[in-house]
Image (tube, coloured by chain):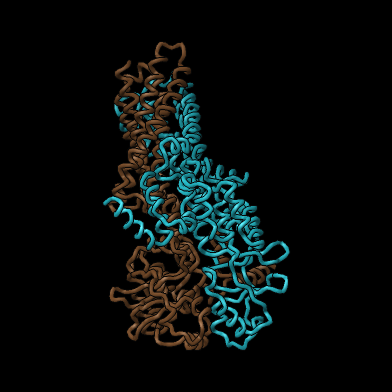
Chain colours: A cyan, B brown
């Protein structure tokens, strides 16, 4: 009976789109995942591997031998093989390369040579090109010789004899103009042209801004070498926002939902280790004022508040900065203005929330001889530490960006470190003067 | 000379794409923004308003009177007017509505009636429909009567006499098949069909999964009422990830980079106020153990470490949960497994980092009679609090999602609150038993 169920499941999987099978695999624990993967017909393995997240893809590839992998991937295009290649064993990649045509082998070599975050690594080579000295009638007849057009073809590219890009003929112009019109009369010359080494995320922003479906990719001499399509762009945007999210939480990489405990724990260590170091540093700051705390124990009770609220406020500033940097809205010209604005907000918030916190502290210790002092101390410390938080919130992401790093990465360790240490220092330091 | 510069600037702006003008406006401080906005030719105002973020759009609309607003928006389509309508004065919207054709007025009414996060609020009404009993030749001749096709037309929709959706004819099938073929022979019947009340983000995920450029939107009776295009989908994905980012930092809404200090400060208050409340609660926990702290002041020095590391570790768990929830990978079936896994990771990390922290604490107070005790206490408290952090990290986002809330929203207040309070409670509580 169990076997019968599996056959049924296999048939159902066969009816699903590869992306849906990938989704099912992602949501399954290891054991069931392997079971389902075994049921998938091997000629679909390649398409499904392409749809999986890196983490899950790796685990499935590890479970297959070279022969299975070759069978799964031999029907893929050069750009698809290039996408899987980093995860495949070297002998499989070599066997795949030797099975390709000369042109495709060259494409595979090219695609694998571009860094991961460039347009070159994302482009595909499957596209339709025409000449500009023919009529639309000729183009229509030419297209009828295809079995199908490449996915997401919204324009065909116009090139000269040596494949230099001259413009593009959007399909809608092909369709609304009379057949006797020449391509050169209706083709569009103002096209967003990309280079293979352009940053993929910047290209994605251009797609977003101009509502594009595809764009040509040229080499430095102006030769058409491929195209970027909107489905890749959607992936780039998704991955970029995920990378920001993960790195801001201090996760080194994407994590398979059902990776082993050991793998997952390792993914989180770098950050936790760093956090422990900075926390011990902050604790040393407190230690310096042990004498003051011994005199007024209430200080120990109130100090985490000063650190916490500045950490939160700094995090708001930092989040807005990271977003504005990603959108390219922060320039040398407006940076000073931004910093001033954030400091002004911190000052205003310091006045408001510092007073609230001060009153609350005063209320809590009402009756004690230190009540007024504690209230004033609280107000002052919150105000100053909010300023520190917003300063760090503006400067750290900007500095990381200037250094060519991801502005989100590690920002928040540095922020917490500073607002904690400075919070304790300001609060206890002032207290040591007062008491 | 100044005036001459402005004229030049105006001419330059005229050559820019509306999206580029919007980008320039977003990056300018208030005063310069108004100056540049004044230079933009009024017939382009509408297109530019559509490209702006909500915050900046509002500020520009406020600067215009009803007449200017009407002039700027009268050339827009019904779906575009619907997008701007919430920010426009009521009399402008009414005047716009009365200037529309009967069909368009109906579309405007419909578009405005759908909630913001549905497909209906994002769809457009501009599309080409054909019948299935004609040949491709007839379709080609019909399309030639258009001046241009609607943006992002990758398929034309096949409907019957009463506009019921029957299928779609992708442009590439129109182009590769012989002109004498009937539409019904080559049209695609397996098309992703959306309903106007579908969640826009779920529709976006379907676009992403199946690499779509457009999809038909049907009413409950199966009548074709509009279509969703990939450019809107890209916006939905972008906005969703931004909303997650902002709400996780406790920002109520998108913020204009150059909003007034007052406006910006208000945007951040809810969170800071909440944070202050929870911080005072955590501080009350410490207060309970004032006696113990008075005996061993080192406790005050070490306690923020216990709270901090669990907050960070819980934040990692929570980030992964929020992401998995957004991707729909968390199900009732695998939830328990996930919780077990996260607790196991927290246990392992507790063992590792708890020991490191314990050793460090022991080293710091080496020579003091309390050194061994402090080390043991530290290890135990870090381990327990890491478990608390991961429990909250799994349960809170899931709970918010179950309650129909955004899982990111406020998650981290609750997390910090718990890891702080419980961290102090566990550490000082154990200490009060030990010392």
Q: Nearer the viewer, residue B237 or B284?
A: B237
Name the residue at the left extreme. A1
Q: Nearer the viewer, residue A117 or A412?
A: A117
Residue located at (41% from left, 55% from top): A40
User: Does residue B298 appear in this view?
Assistant: yes
* B144 up-or-down from B48: above or below: below
Q: Is residue A102 above or below residue B397?
A: below
Q: Is residue B135 left or right of residue A171?
A: left
Quadrant where the image shows the C terminus of chain A: top left
Q: Nearer the viewer, residue B426 or B98?
A: B426
Count of numbered tags: 0
Question: Is A213 located above or below residue A241 in the figure?
Answer: below
- Horizontal and vertical percent position of residue B190: 38, 71
What residue lies at 31% left-to-right and 76% top-to-bottom? B222
Q: Is residue B166 left or right of residue B147?
A: left
Q: Is residue B408 visible?
A: no
Residue B3 place in picture, x, y as percent: 66, 70
Residue at the image point whose x is 62% and y is 55% from the top: A97
In the rendered image, which quarter is residue B163 located in?
bottom left
Q: Is residue B398 left or right of residue B19?
A: left
Q: Position of residue B114 (x, y in %)?
A: 33, 69
- Residue A276 position, x and y percent, is 47, 30
């Amino acid at each position: 009976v169990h076997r019968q169920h599996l056959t049924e499941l296999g048939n159902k999987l066969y009816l699903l789109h590869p992306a849906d099978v990938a989704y099912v695999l992602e949501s399954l624990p290891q054991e069931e995942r392997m079971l389902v993967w075994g049921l998938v017909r091997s000629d679909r393995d390649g398409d499904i591997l392409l749809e999986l997240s890196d983490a899950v893809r790796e685990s499935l590839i590890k479970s297959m031998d070279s022969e299975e992998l070759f069978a799964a991937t031999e029907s893929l295009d050069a750009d698809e093989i290039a996408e899987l290649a980093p995860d495949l064993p070297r002998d499989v990649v070599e066997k795949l390369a030797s099975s390709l045509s000369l042109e495709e082998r060259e494409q595979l070599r090219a695609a694998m040579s571009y860094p991961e975050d460039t347009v070159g690594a994302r482009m595909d080579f499957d596209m339709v090109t025409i000449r500009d000295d023919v009529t639309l009638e000729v183009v229509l007849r030419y297209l009828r010789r295809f079995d199908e057009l490449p996915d997401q073809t919204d324009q065909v590219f116009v090139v000269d004899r040596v494949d230099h890009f001259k413009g593009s003929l959007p399909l809608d112009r092909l369709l609304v103009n009379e057949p006797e019109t020449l391509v050169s009369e209706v083709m569009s010359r103002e096209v967003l042209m990309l280079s293979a080494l352009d940053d993929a995320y910047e290209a994605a922003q251009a797609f977003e801004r101009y509502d594009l479906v595809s764009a040509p990719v040229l080499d430095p001499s102006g030769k058409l070498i491929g195209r970027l399509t909107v489905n890749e762009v959607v992936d780039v945007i998704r991955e970029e926002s995920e990378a920001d999210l993960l790195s801001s939480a201090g996760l080194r990489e994407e994590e398979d939902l059902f990776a082993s405990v050991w793998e997952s724990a390792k993914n989180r260590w770098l950050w936790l280790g760093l956090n422990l170091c900075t926390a011990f540093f902050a604790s040393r700051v407190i230690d310096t004022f042990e004498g003051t705390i011994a005199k007024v124990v209430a200080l120990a009770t109130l100090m985490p508040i000063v650190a916490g609220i500045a950490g939160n406020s700094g995090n708001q500033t930092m989040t807005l900065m990271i977003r504005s940097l990603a959108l390219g809205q922060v320039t040398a010209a407006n940076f000073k203005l931004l910093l001033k604005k954030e400091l002004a907000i911190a000052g205003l918030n310091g006045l408001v929330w510092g007073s609230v916190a001060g009153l609350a502290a005063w209320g809590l210790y009402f009756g004690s001889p230190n009540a007024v002092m504690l209230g004033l101390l609280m107000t002052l410390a919150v105000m100053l530490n909010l300023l520190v938080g917003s300063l760090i919130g503006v400067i750290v992401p900007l500095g990381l960006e200037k250094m060519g790093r991801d502005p989100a990465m590690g920002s928040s360790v540095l922020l917490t470190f500073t607002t904690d240490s400075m919070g304790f220092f300001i609060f206890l330091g002032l207290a040591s003067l007062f008491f």
